[in-house]
Amino acid sequence: MAIRDVLRMGDPRLLAPARPVGDFGSPELAQLIVDMHDTMRALNGAGLAAPQIGVGLQVVMFEVNVDPRQLNPRYPDAESVPFTVLINPVLTPLSDEMETDWEGCLSVPGMRGRVPRHVALRYQGHDAAGRPIDRSVSGFHARVVQHEVDHLNGILYPMRIRDLRDFGFTDVLFPGQHLQDD
């Protein structure tokens, strides 16, 4: 088990575009995926991108469990999202419909912001073994995928906020809700 440090906003490595993965069978990729999984779970993340732990490869993962015994304290009201490792992703919006909602990020701890995202999209890529993934999703699942894939392009969610009045510290924006710090 290796829990890695998560880079925080301001670190220039978060702004660099990630490189595609070429070797799906490498021990380095396998270890990266284990480290990302351990880090995401330890920090109650809904997702994690390799650049967030200082690795400039196109690897993201995401999951939200809605089992009442294992609720994610950062997103207690979120819909379930199955655990997915997505490598070299390509996103295709399924419509022009956008929705603005709250997001947080392990690289922007203690803050939340309202971010516009496509409501429905198709994502394609590969799993950890190099097998193709092709899913069409909507709602929170689509939001999480867009957020994580943004990291691969050097984009942090505050860069997408249209009105900075919709950005602030979690404990101030949501007093008394005791959402776990991002």
Image: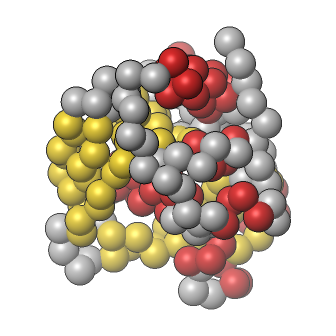
Viewer can see residue 97:
yes
**Which residue: 33% across, 70% down?**
118
The image position of residue 173, as x and y in percent, is 74, 65
**Which residue: 38% across, 40% down?**
22
Using the image, determine if residue 130 lies above or below residue 125. Answer: above
The image position of residue 91, as x and y in percent, is 29, 61
The image position of residue 93, as x and y in percent, is 24, 68
Residue 75 lies left or right of residue 81; in this view the side is right
Residue 171 lies left or right of residue 101; in this view the side is right
The image position of residue 130, as x and y in percent, is 28, 30
Using the image, determine if residue 131 lies above or below residue 47. Answer: above
Using the image, determine if residue 91 lies above or below residue 178. Answer: below
Q: Going by the picture, which residue comes out furthest to the bottom?
A: 163
Nearer to me, 27 or 76: 27
Picture quarter containing residue 135?
top left
Numbered marks: total: 0
Residue 38 lies left or right of residue 142; in this view the side is right
**Which residue: 51% across, 18% down?**
27
Nearer to me, 59 or 117: 59
Picture quarter containing residue 159?
bottom right
Viewer can see residue 37:
no
**Which residue: 68% across, 12% down?**
1
Using the image, determine if residue 80 lies above or below residue 115. Answer: above
Nearer to me, 139 or 34: 34
Q: Going by the picture, which residue comes out furthest to the top?
A: 1
